[in-house]
Structures are given as structure tokens and as C-alpha cells.
Amino acid sequence: MVQPTLVGTAELAALLGVSKQTISNWRSKESDFPEPIAELKSTPVWDQALVVAWAIARGLSSSELQKAIAESAAVAVSLMNMKGGVGKSTLTANLGWYCAYRKQKRVLLVDLDPQFNLTQYVLGVDRYEQLVKAGRPTILDVFEQVGIDAVTKVAPKREPSSVITRLKAWNKGGRLDLVPSRLELAWTLKNPQFKEKPLAKFASAVSRSYDLILIDCPPTESILTEAAYLASNYILVPVKPEFLSTIGLPLLARSIADFQERNEAASLKLAGIVFNSSSPTKSEHSRSRKDVASVARQYGWYVFQHELGYSDSYPRGSRYGTPIFHTNYARWERISEFEVLAEEFMERVGLKAHEPGTPA
């Protein structure tokens, strides 16, 4: 279970850049100031995350507070390739499951693709149909002013958590949640003006509730691409080693470079290129690997040391909403190769620097 960071009055004052008397005044005068989780003889004790959230809402700023915000925020990774059919949704789902179930991380999956493959994968067919029938909020609600009140002509304020569908939670603290998508997300592309920032704002609002946010992106350049860049720390690029495997890479490189030129303050890194559905024996795959490696060297991009081979267990798992390591009859060698790839992924995005229950 993820343990809270506990702070006393002195630590809280230093964190927020104020005096201990100011903390005392806030406790007595500000009704929304977080309650201590314990009253010790020497000092009250707070959950730091709750106070940080309160300070952010108040617009407070200090060097220690900004450091705490950065340390408590989730790592956001967008899976992206300007070429479709490379297995983005499958990889997103399985990485999410692995980090949540095997590594006790709090993981949020965000389906940013109007084709909603990720949503169907992790929910399974039956649960997805139930979600549609229930009219549950989706990623579209993050971008669009929907549900306008007929009298006030104003969209009702929607809490960020309302668009999150709970998937699984485990006793040791791991959790897997989803922001589902639907076909109507394509509507947001028809009127893209001012649509690039809502996703980043949403991710920031829920970030301290998660360790990892995985964003499954559509395979075309659009306002959704810009939104993903603004919301992410890293880009992960799945590639199938087949004919024209490099076709989307120069487009992606140009897209990232253009974004960074327009957003110099943004911190966006490329986690690397992952080969998916590969075979060590096919000559075409070997040739494609060389082509991709050549392009990667040109842009200074990392290529993952571990690859994923094709397995029928991936599409089988999508039918039942399960990862490969929970799918019946999945071959152990395919499970093993996915696990080492997932470990390399966690290391690349900094999630292995501090495992739960170990010293920092």
C-alpha cells in the first residue's frame, strides 16, 4: 500500500513558505484547510498530499512546494506512432496491468483514440456495452462542453474524477483505472480551437492520485496529438518490424520538434521505440529492424533492448479484458518476454527508482 508522507507544523510551514503562526491561522480561519490525521503532543500531523492539493487550489507557490508537486505527480506516458496497426492499445493495456498488478502502482489509462480500442480491451465486450448503455462520461467530456443546461445555457461543472471508470484495485495498493473513449470523440476534431489544453489540465488535477498515466493516442496528427504532448512527460513508440515500418517515424520526429519549438518550457522526452509482434527468424523483420535502428540513430532515439513477439493471447485477452499474464493458455515464454519489456519500460520512465516499501 502506498504510504502517505506525514509532516508536522514546522515542516508544513517550510513547505508552503510561511510561518508556523500562518499555519495556525489557516487552521482556525480557513474552513477548507485539511484536517490533521493525528494530534500529537508535540505537533499536529498532516498528510502532505492533502495540503499540497489545497495549496495548489489556492495558487500558493514556494520552491519547496513546487518540488513536492513534482515529486508527487504521476509520470505521464503517451503511446504514439503516426502509422496505425502497430499495437499501441494492446501494449498500453498490458503495461498498465503489469504496473498496477505486479508492481502495486496506481495506474490511469486514458483512451485518446476515437476508435476506442483500448477501452474495449480493458473493459471486455460485456462491460463496454454496459458503459455505453449507462451513458457514462468519457474522454469526450474532458474536451467538450456537453450537457448544456437549457435554462442557464452553461455546462454543469464536472469533477475530473467523474470521467474515470474504476477497473481493478488490490490490497497492496495497486490500482487500475480508465478514462474511456467513444467514436464521438472525432467530433472534437471538427472544431479544434482551444482544445489542446483540457487534457493537460485534467491530468494535472488527478495526477497526485496516480503513479503512472498511460495515454493511448490515435495514429494521425491532430489537436489530440498536441493535447497528448502537453499532458505527457514521455513518448513511447511501438513499431512492427515490417515493410514501411519507418514510415511514421520521420513524421513523429517532425511533430515532436515542432511542438518543442512552440513550447520551450515543456518537458517532453522520448522513452524509446519498442518492437512489437517481431520474429527473430524472419528476414523481413531483420531488415526492418535495421531500417528503424538507422532512423533512431538519426534522431538520437533509444531502441528498447527487449521486444515482443506475436501471440494469439493478446487478442484473446482483449475479448475478456485481461492481460497476457492472466490469459488462459498463454505460453510462458511470451509472458516472460513481456515482463522483461515492462521492467525496461519502468526503468526508462523512472518508475523503478523507488519501489513501494523500499528506502528512497
Image (cartoon, helix red, strand yellow):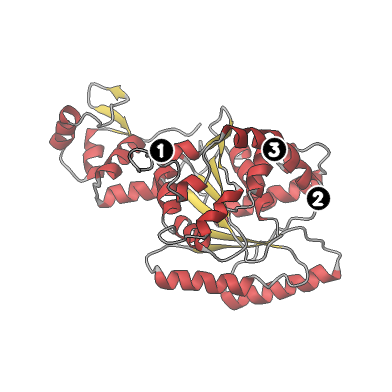
Name the residue carrying label 2: 311
Instruction: Identify the amino acid type marked 3.
Output: Gly
Judging by the rendered image, the residue that carries numbered circle 1 is 159
Q: CA distance from mark 3 to mark 1?
A: 26 Å
Q: Nearer the viewer, mark 1 or mark 2?
A: 1
Q: Position of residue 337 (x, y in %)?
A: 74, 51
Q: Which mark is residue 124?
A: 3
- Earlier in the chain: of badge 2 and badge 3, it is 3
* Circle 1: element type: loop
Does residue 203 appear left or right of residue 278 in this picture?
left
Instruction: Say the numbered circle drawn on residue 345.
Output: none
Few, some or many residues within 10 Å of mark 2 (<14, 14–19, 20+): some
x%, y% of residue 51? 30, 37
The amino acid sitting under disc 2 is Ser
Q: CA distance from mark 1 to mark 2?
A: 39 Å
Total label count? Answer: 3
The residue under label 1 is which amino acid type? Glu
